[in-house]
Image (cartoon, rainbow, N blue to C red):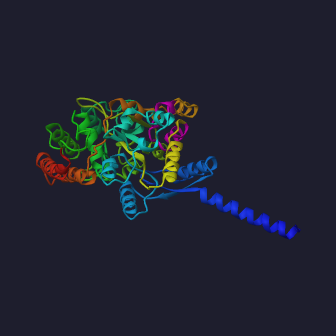
Amino acid sequence: MNILTRLTIAATLAVTALGASDASATDITFYYPIAVGGPITKVVDDYVAEFSKTHPDITVKPVYTGSYQDSIVKAMTAAKAGNAPDVAVLLSTDMFTLIDDELIEPYDAIAKSESDQAWIKSFYPAFMENSQADGHTWGIPFQRSTIVQYWNKDAFKAAGLDPEKPPANWDEMVAFGKKLTKRDASGAVTQWGLEIPSSGFPYWLFQALTTQNGAILANQDGTKVAYNDPKVVEALQFFADLSQKHEVMPKGVIDWGTTPKDFFEGKTAMMWTTTGNLTNVRSNAKFAFGVAALPSKVRGGSPTGGGNIYIFKSGDKARQAAALEFARFLSTPERAADWGIATGYVATRPDAWQTDAMKKYVSGFASAAVARDQLKEAVAELSTHDNQRVTKALNDALQAVLTGVKPAKPALDEAQAEATRILARYQP
C-alpha cells in the first residue's frame, strides 16, 4: 500500500469518526430570563462553558429571553410551534400554566435513580411549595428569593433614628417613614421614607402585606383565591394609606425597575424588593445600608419568589437526559452558593450554605443570610391555574386602589369575581 493510499484511508477514517462524534453529540437549548440588575449573562455564560468542559458530548445553547413575562410567552410560543426549549428558567408561578398546556415533563418521570431522588429532596421545603403539584415535581429551584427591606443607614442617622434598627412592624414602618420623608421649602418631597413597588410584580409585593396580616391568597391546588378576604382588604387599605394618608410613599404606581435606583440616589430611605437585588445594591449604594426581614403585623413573613428550572417535552430521550444533567449541574451545592454570591438570590439548598465559599461570604456580609433566615416564615407565592389572568385581576385591583380610582373592598370584590369565573373550569 503506497503512502497516498494510506493517507486517503486515514483521512476517510478521521472524517467518519468525526461524523460519528457529531452524530452522538446532544444539542440542547436553554432559555434564561434577564430580570434583575448585575452581570447575569456573563455568569450564565461561564456556567455553560464550565458544563461544556465536563460534558463534551452535550452542547448547551443559551438564549436570553428578556423579562420573566417575555420568557414565558417566548417559551410557550416556541413549544406550540414544535421548537420548544429543552430547559428553561421561568417563574415558579408559571408551573400550573405549563402543566395545563402539557409543555413540561415532571422530574420524577426522568430522574429515577437514587441519586436523582436525593437531589430532588435536597432543596428548602419553602421553595418546593411552588415546585410540586399533583404528587409530582415539576420545577427545580434555581434563582429563588424572598422580599426583604433595605434601609439607608445614613438617612436613618440624619433623621435621628438608630441606623442599626429597621422597622420591626407596620406601626414602626409608618413612624420611621414620617421621620425619613424630607421636603424642601416649597413642600416638594426630596426624600421619601419608603417605596414598595407596585408595577412589574405588584401582586407579589402586596402578598407580603397580606401574609403579614395573616391571609393566604390561594389554595395549594391553585384552584381558588381569597382576594376579598377581610384581612386582604385591610392589607390593601394599609398599602394605599402609606401614600394617601400617611404620606411616606409616592402616590400612584411605583415602578419596580427604578426603585433600586431611587434608593441609590437617596430619593427613598427604605425600599422593599427582592433579595435578588442584593448584589446590585451592594455594588451601587454609596452609603451604609442594612438588609432585614420584612416588618410584621399579626405575623412576619414574605412570599417566596423567583425562577425554577423546567424541562420541556421533546419526545427525545437523549435531549431530556441532557437537560436533566444540565439542571443537576446548575443546582449543585457549590453552584447554588456561587449563584447566590454572584446575584443575591437565596442559595436554594441547605448544604450550599455549608460550602467554604458561602461561609466566607456570609462571615464578611451577614446581610446575605437574611432572606434565607426569613424562609421559616415564608409562604408560597400566589400561583394558580391560568395564573396570568388570575393575577392580572388582582393587579388591576391594586392599581385602581393605589391610584385612588376605587376603594379597596369594591376593587377586591371585582377581582374575586373575575378570578372565580376564570377558575371555574378547574373546580372538581
Whether residue 425 can be seen here: yes
Q: Is residue 359 above or below residue 69?
A: above
In this image, 388 relative to 264: left or right? left
What residue is shown at x 42% (from left), y 43% (from top)?
A: 109
Membership of 116 in magenta stretch:
no
Depth order, front residue of 334/404: 334
In this image, 320 relative to 391: left or right? right
Give the prevailing secondary structure in the magenta stretch.
Answer: helix
Q: Position of residue 413 (x, y in %)?
A: 12, 47
What residue is shown at x 35% (from left), y 56% (from top)?
A: 69
In this image, 82 relative to 200: left or right? right
Q: Quadrant of residue 222?
A: top left
Q: Position of residue 323 (x, y in %)?
A: 50, 49
Membership of 343 in magenta stretch:
yes
Give the tally of numbered discs.
0
- Span highlighted in magenta in the image: 334-353
What residue is shown at x 20% (from left), y 52% (from top)?
A: 393
Q: Position of residue 88 (x, y in %)?
A: 44, 52
Q: Quadrant of residue 246?
A: top left
Q: Residue furthest front?
A: 1
Q: Quadrant of residue 229?
A: top left
